Image (cartoon, helix red, strand yellow):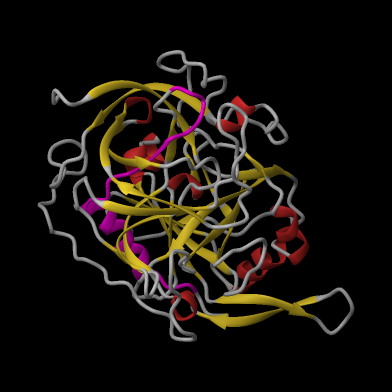
Amino acid sequence: MSSRARRITAALGGLVAACVTMTSAFAGSAAATPLDGVPNGITSITLTKSSADMRRIAEYWSPARLKQAMDNVPASPGMKNDGPPASASPTSAATPGGATAGSATAAAASAGGESATATAVTAETGTTTGGKGSTAPRGSAPVVKPTLPKKRAPASGSSPVTVGKVFFRIGAKDYWCSASSVAATNRNLVATAGHCAYDAKTGSQAEYWIFIPGYDKGDTPYGIYIGHSLNLHEDFVGRGDYDYDYAFVTVHDGFRWKAGKTSGSYEMESVGSLEDNVGGQGLATNRGAGLASLAFGYPAGPHPDGSRPYNGQQLKSCRGLTIKVKAPTRLVEQGVALACTFTNGASGGPWLIFYDGKNAVGYLNGVNSFAWDVNADRKYDRISSPYFIASTYAVYHWAATQQAPRS
């Protein structure tokens, strides 16, 4: 280890989500089955096989339910094989997944904190070599260029409308996370955290998965996009390995709810593809550490000390240089992190490099994965992301070729 490296005790908080306990209003669920012919190393799960599946999910997320979802309670799905934390710390009153709906008043539980000894390495440039997923040489994965929307003028500034919220159900609970549109051949692709599509603790995939780009205080200005297939690295699904805590979700063309012909009723109105409406961020892998990055998300949960600076209703951002980190209890050997005070709910939000403020696009180089209390002051001060490598591009490329059935 470099003489500049230092040992720290970090509180690792799953930045997921928000959930609320409820029973589905519909019997059964959308079909969720593995896709045939998937390349090695990728898990791909089909959520919809027909327009009827799509309609059922749309009806589940009625205007009334979406309004209710604004007040969901932050919680963490948790890690595979949860057990006692590696070492005790004041912020580790509950392991991820230990929080139940309605327990947000208990700060430690809603933080989903787990204590672990981690190594923070000073920033350095270059490509990670050795360890997991290092079989591809630098630059072996193509760079995906960002795209601009076709149906309106590009956004500008520090609030890209490609970023929004995802809502989904696992078991009897509804959750939400952050996510972003990504440029793809199918023009309907979303990037988020793996734990925003699959619960490694219970081995359950998300269902009733939707994405709302440009989400702001409950508004759906660019439509609602229903998930067609969840695409993840097999080591996140099989081992709960947070070096692969990312997912690329193929979605259907979007729709918006409009008033129906009778009082109190609603009808679906098509709005076209995701990329046509908001554009898509690019993608770059194997870029090393020490990069100027912008992280976006919708944080909502409290810090371990109970303070709650965010409400989850507006897009927030952090800017900084990335450093390399390790988190053994989450199997992270080659993570990257940056200084940020994000809390639960920011999970899955994009990390963008080479950001163009004129068009509000850049290159996806990570996603919010979990939070750290490096200073041990019961406030999160760092977030981390999986390090994007060639296998990340492989999952992206497979997802980009999937085409949701047209209604």
**Left or right, 103 with reference to 206:** right
Identity of the residue furthest to the top in this view: 88
Which residue sits at x=21%, y=45%?
289
Up the image or down, 47 lies above or below 54; here it is above
Identity of the residue furthest to the right in this view: 263
Which residue sits at x=59%, y=45%?
310
* Residue interval drawn in magenta: 376-404
Magenta segment includes 391: yes
Which residue sits at x=49%, y=53%?
297
Identity of the residue furthest to the left in this view: 137
Using the image as rendered, state which of residue 342 and residue 80 is in the foreground: 342
Q: Is residue 144 visible?
A: yes
Up the image or down, 173 lies above or below 269; here it is above
Magenta segment includes 153: no
What percent of the width, then of the height, locates residue 71? 71, 49
Residue 393, quarter of picture: bottom left
What percent of the width, then of the height, locates residue 20? 70, 43
Q: Quadrant of the C terminus?
A: bottom right
Number of numbered markers: 0
Q: Quadrant of the N terminus?
A: top left
Up the image or down, 140 lies above or below 237; here it is below
Q: Is residue 281 visible?
A: no
What percent of the width, then of the height, locates residue 46? 48, 60
Using the image as rendered, state which of residue 316 and residue 42 is in the foreground: 316
